[in-house]
Amino acid sequence: MKLILAFALFLCFSTGCSLYKSEGRKQFESEAQDKIAAAAGAFQLKGCKNEGKLETWFNEEFPSRNYELVLAESDLEIWRTMKGKVVEVKALQKMENSTQSCIYEFSNEIVWNLYKEDFIRELENNFMSLD
């Protein structure tokens, strides 16, 4: 019985686990943790609000000079500005009776450039929510 148990342990440690002990696997696990941590902290939602028609009209006619237009679609606009090193992004989603405005912050310009396309794609494919 001891011989069978010893043989089973030998097989487990010598063959089945070799993939997980490889340098490639260690490198993958190390990089994956860093990438997940970076993505999780890439941006944060600062707040959302519903704008009335008058406020929406005013913001469209007289946009802030500090903001740069990133995306303009019929129902979605994305603007960005720098606040020190932080990139502030304002997303405006137009609905029938109001416009929803959400402010996001990216930690810096490098992070913004890295996640910009994914961020825009998410907003294009999903409605923003106050919840």
Image: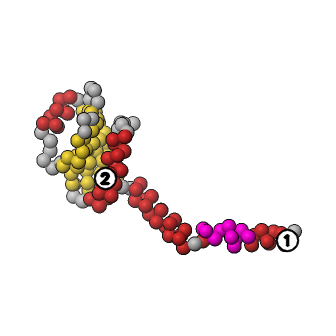
| In the foreground, 127 or 104 | 127
Residue depicted at 20% across the width and 33% down the height: 56
Residue depicted at 25% across the width and 50% down the height: 88
Within 10 angstroms of label 2, few (less than 14), some, or many (20 or more) residues?
some
Is residue 31 visible from the viewing direction of this image? Answer: yes
Residue 52: x %, y % from top left? 23, 29
| Picture quadrant where residue 109 is located | bottom left
Measure the alpha-carbon separation of dots 1 and 2: 59 Å
Residue depicted at 85% across the width and 71% down the height: 2
Quadrant occupied by the C terminus: top left
The residue beneath circle 2 is: 116
Is residue 92 visible from the viewing direction of this image? Answer: no
Quadrant occupied by the N terminus: bottom right
- Tell me the SS state at disc 1: helix
* Three-letter amino acid code at the position of disc 1: Lys
Within 10 angstroms of label 1, few (less than 14), some, or many (20 or more) residues?
few
Mark 2 or mark 1, which is nearer the start of the sequence?
A: 1
Residue 114: x %, y % from top left? 33, 58
User: Looking at the image, is 128 positioned above or below residue 115?
Assistant: above
* Three-letter amino acid code at the position of disc 2: Lys
Disc assigned to residue 2:
1
| Picture quadrant where residue 126 is located | top left
User: Looking at the image, is 110 positioned above or below residue 18?
Assistant: above
- Tell me the SS state at disc 2: helix
Asked if marks 1 and 2 touch (Cβ < 8 Å), the reply is no
- Left/right placement of residue 62 relative to residue 40 reads left
Q: Which residues are magenta?
A: 11-20
Residue 117: x %, y % from top left? 32, 51
